[in-house]
Image: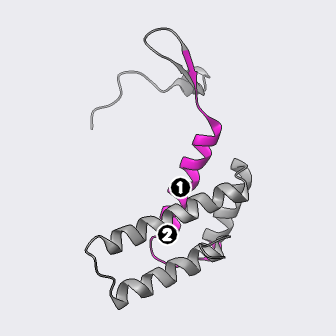
Amino acid sequence: MAPAPFPPPSVFGLERSRSFVSRNGSVATVDPVREAFTTYWELLKTVVADLEITEEELVLVQSERVRSGLKDEQVRVLHARAFASVIQQFTSDQWVDDREVRKLRRLHQCLSKLGWAPGE
């Protein structure tokens, strides 16, 4: 990989901006709710990928929820989205076998341990 042509802003004592200027000159800011949703969604996908929740992962998820200020209702949306996406994937072939049922149960347990799972 080629080195960057310019040093990072931190070299000059600068921090990254939370907004950017579009080509037409207007300033757009980062939506903190959208950023919180995106950050939690990526974290959620990572911690449930192996269908096991360690204590470290549990603490990490709880800390992120507090840091981002996500409300319980917003967490439910993201947990429901995760569960629904797996169901959609498993039903795309119009067949849900026993292995997939076991995975859905494990995912449900993981989401429940993280604070909420569909049906609770």
Q: Quarter of the image holding residue 100?
A: bottom left
Is 7 placed above or below 102 here? above
Describe the element under mark 2 as helix, strand or loop: helix
Q: Nearer the viewer, residue 41 or 54?
A: 41
Give the labeled residue for mark 2.
Answer: 83
- Residue shown at 55% from the left, 78% from the top: 108
Magenta region: 27-56
- Residue 90 place in picture, x, y as percent: 34, 74
Q: Looking at the picture, how far across and down is residue 104, in whole percent?
A: 46, 80
Q: Secondary structure at mark 1?
A: helix
The image quadrant where one finds the C terminus is: bottom right
- First in sequence: mark 2 vs mark 1: 1
Q: How is the image coloured?
A: one colour
Residue type at mark 1: give it: Trp
Whether the magenta-drawn stretch holds residue 34 is answered as yes
Q: Residue at x 62, y 22 (%)?
A: 13
Distance from disc 2 to disc 1, alpha carbons, whole Å, reads 12 Å
